[in-house]
Amino acid sequence: MIPTDPTHGTGRLPVKLRQHLILFAGFATLPVHAATDTWEGSGPFATGAGNRVIHALAAGPDGLTIFAGTGSGTVFRYVHSNSVPTPFGFSAQAGVVPGTEAVSDEIAVQGINVPAPISIASCTGTACAYSINDGAWSGGPGMVAVDDRVRVRQTASASHATQTVLTLEIGGVSGAFSVTTAPAPVFEHGACGGAHAIPSLTAPLSGLCAVGTAGAVTSTASAYSWTCAGSLGGDNAACAAPRQYEVTPSAGANGAIAPAATQAVTHGQTIGFTVTPDSGFGIASITGCGGTLTGNLYTTSAITGACAVHATFTAAPVAGQCGTAHGQASLLAPTTGLCAIGTPGAVTSAAGRHDWLCQGANNGGDQTCAAPGASAHGGGGTITLQLTGGGCVIDSATPVAPPLGGPTGVTMPLDALGLTLTGCGTGGSAQVTVTYSTPVDRMRYWKYLNGAWTAIPATLSGDSAVFTLIDGGALDADGQTNGVIVDPGGPGLDDAMPIPALAPWALALLAGLLGLLGLGASARRGRG
């Protein structure tokens, strides 16, 4: 039984130490190991000679040391020396540039308790060396101790995709450092990216190159340009994106423009906008971007910069249009049905007809309208009637055949006018204007009173006759002051009135006609 050492304890001893102890217990001579194994203490055991009775035996925690005790209390320590390190290796390196130096990672020497030899066992690279504790690099043999830090280096092959290996040996244990150079590069042509040929408002920042390195983006009025540089002799690619500009539409009140949002338009192109007025309105103006309006479509000129299009609207032009009174015969000036569209102007009565305008709105055209006067009895032209002053209104007015055929010795080509006025007020008066479709300026106005014709004071000029009627007056046919005036009458031409003198031009024309007649007669006599 091996007694427990109070300091080191007991345990299973290494095979080598057990062998030594067996020899020791059998009083054999203890062999000496590699000249570095040593006994420490006094007496014969110190030299390995002689024998002793072992009373206590224990192993140290390092597995290399044993302690032996004798009966006299003397303790001896046996140390086994080890110069074989724990296995080690270096991380492989790949993608190394050919012909460059590669330095390994660092290892720490472990598992030895005495210095161990170090050397480069082999190396397929060049300039192979090792360094201890960041010291000088060496390619020859050396010594290392436990916990020393070691790195190796080599110059990689000058060829691509080639491996070189440095093998380092420490105390008979080898570790490799592998270096593989990068594969041979293949040249690349530059290639444009997704931004190429895509119209853009601003200089593109991404998608410039699919292959290669993008150069600086430059700009002109029409495009943004850049290059994608090739590598290792590859060609450069020239790339560009068409430049766009903003075209901003807007519309005033009473209409719309479409599209209404700001549009991005590529340099040199045009864009169209549809302009739609509200109901009852039209396009007043549309300007901007050098465009033209065709119908409701406004098309810009070629865009070369940012610009704006603006539309304004105005009430639509409305052309005047005659109403139902147009063309309808009427003795009195019509007061209703004058205009179907537009504002009627004042009605004037002359030459036996009534005339007025239907005025358009918003610069719309006017239309001239007319209604013929009432046909005179017997078809002798037309008559119109106007009444002013005195508060009188026309109760009835009708062209009639002249009573008794008219005044004796007087021709009435337009017949008579049966007229009744009411609302004049007692003793009231009214001015009457009658127009005819033929001139009456050489006639007199005749009124039928008390069964006889009488010429009354009246002004006949051109195609009109103007006279004044007074309720109950001499020209009031009923002879009563009752607010009612009855007036049958009309213009008449005295039969004895000489033929009007002809104008000089008419006399000249008549002389010419007579001369032609004389020439014709002479020619007939000559033939006879």
Image: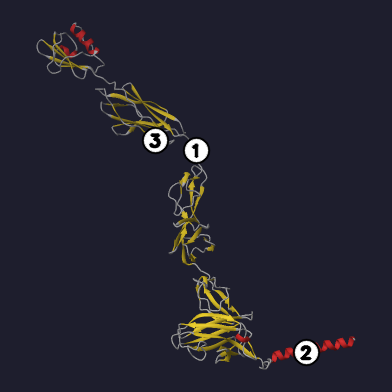
Q: CA distance from mark 1 to mark 2?
A: 120 Å
Q: Indicate the position of residue 232 as horizontal and vertical percent values.
A: 49, 42
Q: Classify mark 3: helix, strand or loop.
A: strand
Q: Read off the residue under disc 1.
A: 186
Quadrant where the C terminus is found in the figure: bottom right
Q: CA distance from mark 3 to mark 2?
A: 140 Å
Q: Nearer the viewer, residue 415 or 22?
A: 415
**Crowd around label 3: few <14 · some 14–19 · many ≥20 (10 Å):** some
Q: CA distance from mark 3 to mark 1?
A: 23 Å
Q: Read off the residue under disc 2.
A: 514
Determine the residue positioned at 70% across, 89% down.
506
Determine the residue positioned at 33% across, 33% down.
137
Give amino acid for label 1: Val
Q: Classify mark 1: helix, strand or loop.
A: loop
Q: Nearer the viewer, residue 437 or 487?
A: 487
Hey, which residue is sitting farthest right in the picture?
528
Mark 3 or 2 closer to N-term? 3
Q: Are marks 1 and 2 in contact (CB under 8 Å)?
A: no
